Amino acid sequence: MMNATDKENELLIKAKNGDKNAYGEIVKNYMRRAYFAALSIVGSSEDAVDLSQEAFIKAYRALKKFDQEKKFYTWYYSILRNLCLNFLRNKKRHATNFSEIYDLLESSKDENQDTENMIERNETRKIVWEAIWKLSPEDREIITAKDIVNASYEEIAELLQIPTGTVMSRLYYARKRLKKIIEQSI
């Protein structure tokens, strides 16, 4: 039986040889994760879709340079992250539609609670998301990677190309800053 890594490697070999359907499978596997990664950096659903798609196109064009010994998503993420940061630099503005982001995240979860608890929980989430958007892109990125995408410390270290201890430290201080923002808004 083929594990996920073997299947991905097989798809990557086919994609490197020009099989667009194989690359389409890879995109399908990472599309949601890429979208939320981009969303956490740029703050706009529409821009996150565009940037994650653009990153997949850039990755496809550079696929022959991809080192098969490395993880595809880590390589792809560096392309996506650079596109997002360049986008923010070029835009010089950062408009965020909190309710849109909130609705997107909520639509992906299955909640079976009574109305009163759901309203209270929704208000809490709204406060947290508004606070997250007040953080620096670096703080927002690391919190989102750990707490929204549920990446491990090791995965985040690999994605950001920093030591695991630095991930833990940055996450600790980013959460402290987030807590302070939340306390000020309550």
Image (cartoon, rainbow, N blue to C red):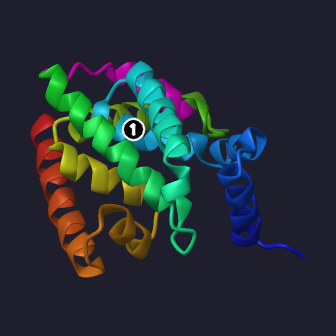
- Considering the image in quadrants, where does the C terminus appear? top left
Q: Is residue 19 visible?
A: yes
Depth check, front residue: 71 or 174: 71
- The residue carrying pointer 1 sits among few (fewer than 14), some (14 to 19) or many (20 or more) residues within 10 Å by Cα, namely many
Image quarter where the N terminus lies is bottom right
Residue 83 vertical placement versus 47 (above, below): below
Figure quadrant of residue 152: bottom left
Query: For this view, does 21 lie left or right of residue 80?
Result: right
- Tally of numbered tags: 1
Query: Which secondary structure class fits the magenta region best?
Result: helix
Q: Position of residue 137 (x, y in %)?
A: 20, 43
Measured as percent of width and height from the top left, residue 153 is found at: 38, 73
Residue found at x 24% / y 64%? 171
Give the percent coordinates (x, y) of residue 12: 67, 58
Q: Is residue 96 magenta?
A: yes
Closer-to-camera residue (185/26): 26
Q: Magenta stretch containing residue 117, yes or no?
A: no
Query: What SS does tag 1 mark?
Result: helix
Q: Is residue 118 among the parts visible in the rendering?
A: no
Query: What residue is rendered at 13% in x and 43% in y?
Result: 181
Percent x, y for residue 66?
Answer: 51, 60
Nearest the viewer among 90 and 128 is 90
> For this view, does 183 lie left or right of residue 49?
left
Question: On the rendered structure, is 49 left or right of 13?
Answer: left
Position of residue 4 in the picture relative to residue 137 (left or right) = right
Residue drawn at point x = 45 percent, y = 61 percent: 74
Amino acid type for the residue under numbered disc 1: Ala
Magenta extent: 93-106
The residue carrying mark 1 is: 38
